[in-house]
């Protein structure tokens, strides 16, 4: 028969495994890399899903912002929260009901971002001339060319550009996770505990 105090004792913990430091990121890296490959393989579908996902996020954020504004009517910028939330909700609704137009809009925004960020990288790299400035200059030049290329191919580029960018981002993130996990694994094998 168990004593009344025995139920309060913590259960024994499983011993911690050092391999947990690299196996989780390794599995995540494989999954994210595969997701990136799938996204690149179906760039048009990925673009459409990205627009719909962004629309849902904007609508949800809009609702939360409106609720926050209404709950804090007397303590904060009530009108700013309500109008900002209403704008987010309407833009999200537009993306959900007009995904084609939303796709063109987001692609133009992405092209403008590439162009502007590349232009600023070129300027800062040229003016600062820090060690390795050439790489930053080259990255800026590639971004400017990519932005200009997307602008020149509009609107025919809009169905696939967003999907390619999402796919490349997922692929590089997955490969980065894989590389990090393998580095940690290699370091742990060199230590007596690994």
Image (cartoon, rainbow, N blue to C red):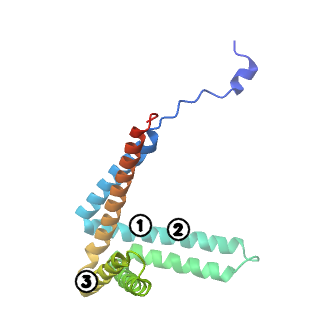
Residue nearest the observer in this picture, 170 or 143: 143
The residue at which mark 2 appears reads as 60
**Residue 187 vs residue 67, the one in the foreground:** 187
Relative placement, left or right, of 60 versus 9 is: left
- The picture places residue 117, in percent across and down from the top left corner, at 40, 82
* Figure quadrant of residue 168: bottom left
**Residue 131 or residue 85, whichever sits in front:** 131
Q: Residues within 10 Å of mark 2 (few under 14, many from 20)?
A: some
Crowd class of label 3 (few under 14; some 14 to 19; many from 20; radius 10 Å): some
190 to the left or right of 44: right
- Kindly identify which numbered label has been placed on residue 104: none
Quarter holding residue 126: bottom left
Q: Residue at x 75, y 20 (%)?
A: 4
Q: Nearer the viewer, residue 171 or 110?
A: 171
Which label belongs to residue 149?
A: 3
Badge 2 marks a residue whose secondary structure is helix
Badge 1: how crowded within 10 Å, few (<14), some, or many (20+)? some
């Amino acid at each position: 028969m168990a004593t009344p105090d025995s139920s309060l004792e913590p259960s024994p913990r499983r011993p911690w495994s050092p391999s947990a430091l690299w196996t989780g990121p390794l599995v995540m890296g494989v999954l994210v890399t595969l997701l990136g490959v799938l996204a690149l393989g179906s760039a048009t579908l990925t673009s459409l899903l990205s627009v719909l996902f962004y629309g849902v996020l904007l609508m949800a954020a809009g609702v939360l912002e409106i609720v926050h504004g209404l709950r804090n009517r007397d303590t904060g910028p009530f009108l700013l929260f309500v109008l900002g939330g209403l704008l987010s909700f309407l833009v999200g609704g537009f993306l959900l009901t007009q995904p084609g137009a939303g796709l063109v809009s987001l692609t133009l925004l992405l092209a403008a971002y590439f162009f502007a960020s590349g232009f600023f990288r070129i300027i800062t790299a040229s003016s600062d001339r820090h060690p390795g400035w050439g790489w930053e200059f080259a990255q800026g030049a590639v971004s400017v060319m990519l932005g200009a290329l997307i602008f020149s191919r509009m609107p025919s580029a809009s169905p696939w550009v967003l999907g390619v960018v999402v796919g490349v981002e997922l692929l590089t993130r997955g490969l980065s996770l894989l590389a990090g996990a393998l580095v940690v694994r290699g370091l742990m094998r060199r230590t007596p505990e690994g």
